[in-house]
Image (cartoon, rainbow, N blue to C red):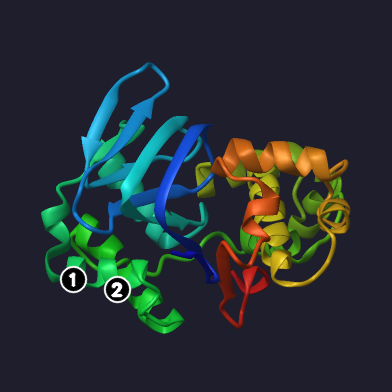
Amino acid sequence: MLNFLHFWDDRFLYITPAIQSGLTERSSTTLLASATGRPFLLEALDGTRMQCAAALVAPNVPRRLDADGCGLLSLNLDPTSGACRELAGVLSDHGIHVIDARCFGRLRERFEAALLGELDGSQLRELGIRMVDAVTGHPTPDVPLDPRIECVLHKVRNHVGRLPLRDLSAVACLSPDRLTHLFREQVGLSLKSYVLWAKILRSVQQFTSSRRLTDVALDGGFTDAAHMSRTFQRYFGLTPSFLADSSRVEISLAPSGLSDA
């Protein structure tokens, strides 16, 4: 069975028949759901082990994952999205929060169809939205960020290569210290962490082309392909060469891509 990786403006969805990862952590809020209803295993940094059919993982929380044979939907919400901010209320102070999968109701009937590649991009987008709504108990409100932060986000998402803090400060018309403080206040994440997150997502989206991984790495601001590989392993537990292999992973991009997130 293929793995599927679908990108939209404010999230991506990785669908896999099985995955066993070492310790990973990433900047997104991650909503995990078993595709078949059989439980998967999550292990926290302190060794706490949780068997569950659904779970929420907060940004930058280390975990190990064993979803061998159950099939898994891994919905990753951009840290600046309204959905990510809404799910923060569900997480409260929990780094990992086990969810009763029954909250998804009849949505679970679509999980296995997603695993088998039977849903198109628009259907999967709708499924992801409704999964978040099921966890929060209400539709996600559209609450805009500070316009100065929006300008910075646009710059980060569209820039290739190194991006000094002073350049972003100029975009926001703020001092570096004030921008750093405001960004964390608005997004709940450091600006440095978000710049890395955007760089990684931009690199993954280039795997749909026939470009060499070394070129993708250098354009993305990584020192070399090995540096990109180490970063990907830490974030996803997967190598760039695995994700770029179309015989293993089918990648689809929404028309807007990351740049319009």
Identify the residue at the far top of this view: 46
Cα gap from disc 2 to disc 1, whole angstroms? 8 Å
Residue 27 to residue 84: above or below: above
Q: Mark 1 points at which residue?
A: 109
| Residue 57 position by quadrant | top left
| Residue 90 position by quadrant | top left
Q: Is mark 2 on a helix, strand or loop?
A: helix
Which residue is depicted at the point 37% across and 25% down?
44
Task: State which quarter of the image contains the N terminus.
Answer: bottom left
| Residue 111 position by quadrant | bottom left
Which residue is depicted at the point 20% across and 69% down?
107
Q: 3 left or right of 159?
A: left
Task: State which quarter of the image contains the C terminus.
Answer: bottom right
Name the amino acid type tagged 2: Ala
- Whether tag 2 and tag 1 are in contact, CB under 8 A, the answer is yes
In the image shown, does 84 or 12 lie closer to the viewer?
12
Name the amino acid type tagged 1: Glu
Q: Position of residue 8 (x, y in %)?
A: 53, 71
Asked if residue 166 shows in the view, the reply is: yes
Give the label on residue 113, or none: 2
Q: Is mark 1 on a helix, strand or loop?
A: helix
